[in-house]
Image (cartoon, rainbow, N blue to C red):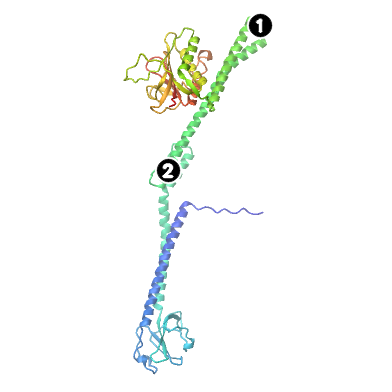
Amino acid sequence: MTRPPRTRRPRSLRSRLVWGVTLLAAAAVLTAQTIGVLVLHSWLLNRIDQQLMEFTLPDRAKLPSRPAPDSVTLPSDFRLTFYDASGDQRGTLGDGEKPGPKLPHSTSALRLTKGHQAVVPAVSGDGHWRVLWKNGPVEDTSFVVALPLDTVEGAMDKLLALNVAVFAATVVGLIAVGRWVVRLGLLPLTRMEHTAQDITAGDLSLRLSDTDPHTETGRLGTVLNDMLDRLQQALRQREFSEARLRRFVADAGHELRTPLTSIQGFAQLALRHPDRPAAQRREADEQVARNAERMNLLVDDLLLLAKLDQEPAYRSVPVDLLALAADAVSAAAVRAGGEYRVTLSPLDENDENDEKTEDSELEVVETVGDPHRLLQVVNNLLSNALVHTPPGPPVDVRVGTARAGATTGGTDRPGRTSASPSLAEGAPIHVIEVADQGPGLLPEEAERVFERFYRVDPSRSRDHGGSGLGLAIATAIAQGHGGRLELDTGAGPGCTFRLVLPARE
């Protein structure tokens, strides 16, 4: 059975930085020391070679006969070895306690080249001599002049020992100082690590403190803070969506339970009392049919809302909003049966500082969209207005074009609520307004009016106020056309619902 290959444990960033800087600096110091040793050694040898080249024999040493050792005085530590015409060694000159150079007794064994310096060992010990073979004063004679290398070797030994000590101290100092500098430089990363651990533990409100844009860690901290903000926002949206889904399921179950309970009760009554009078059976059947129809309408609304949430494909054909509003007004007037007055008028797009026109005329407002869905939105707004408005005051429907702003719609302002984002300020828009003179809405009610299954009066049934899905469906349709549905609640009575669609320029 083969063992799996051992993976090499990766080194930390701090260790890699410390050892990398230490090795680089140590290599630089070692290179400088090596160059210094070589230069000094070469300079000392050149000095000795120069002395050897400039050496001249004393007058007494130039005599043909062998000079007496104590009759000639040589400068410094020079040593001379003489060879006669036959190549045999005839004597040496020079004082000192140092062992002389180890030279052969004949020139045939002398492995030197005249005029070129060389290094030979000493007769005894581990010393060395620098030698130069020169021609003697008499024809066919020669001599070897030598100088000891003790000074050079001693200086090199001391210099090498000093370099070793300096190199060791430098490496130790680099490791110590490098660890301190790297630890100081990586301190922001350490703080980030601790903050990240606290965030992982559950404190999502924490943020990284190092956000200096002039440093790498600061820029990293800024990016991570932005990422954390987006993650926290996504978590909040997820929690909101989950809560909304739970509330939606609970509300849907509550709305469906009431008609189902009625149907179940009448069904059980029919099973227990099959011999009931015909009038009671007819009444029970009517209640079952009414509740079944109510449940069917609720299920249709739920299916439509689910379909709209799944990015439905809307028709894209030219739509005359004025004609669409006129059809909705006509249908609402028929449903009202003369108890309510529904009017159609042009949109008043004047600011508060401008004079309002009284003789405005209706004009064609064309856009592109799905006429069936847009008509559904207007019908829903009119139905809500008629349900909440007492008989007498009119319900006014206004149609026109404008620019998105605080007075015309499309943007947010105090007293205006919407479940959709604002349009660009000053963008051309098409508007259909439905204004009523009903009791109006409180601010907390206006904030929730576009929520699914929300009803201002929870006690109302579908027959007297609906299930609370109408405005949610209308909002989804408006968003699908690139616009939005909004509500204005002013100081006076009533509300103004506004369908805002971007104009196609």
- Determine whether the residue tagged by mark 1 lies in a helix, strand or loop: loop
On screen, residue 350 versus residue 369, left or right, reads left
Q: Quadrant of residue 286?
A: top right
Residue at the right extreme of this rendering: 275
In percent of the image, x 47 and y 54: which residue is there?
16
Residue 483 in view, yes or no: yes
Q: Is residue 222 above or below residue 243?
A: below
The residue where tag 1 is placed is: 276
Amino acid marked by disc 1: Arg
- Determine whether the residue tagged by mark 2 lies in a helix, strand or loop: helix
Picture quarter with the N terminus: bottom right
Say which of 380 and 298 sits in front. 380
Q: Which mark is residue 29?
A: none
Amino acid marked by disc 2: Gly
In percent of the image, x 57 and y 53: which residue is there?
7
Say which of 174 and 120 sits in front. 120
Residue 247, percent from left and from top = 52, 24
Say which of 157 and 354 sits in front. 354
The residue where tag 2 is placed is: 221
What is the distance, in whole Å, between disc 2 and disc 1 at their CAs? 79 Å
In percent of the image, x 47 and y 19: which residue is there?
320
Residue 444 in view, yes or no: no
Mark 2 neighbour density, 10 Å: few (under 14) some (14–19) many (20 or more): many
Residue 234, percent from left and from top = 48, 34
In percent of the image, x 60 and y 54: which residue is there?
5
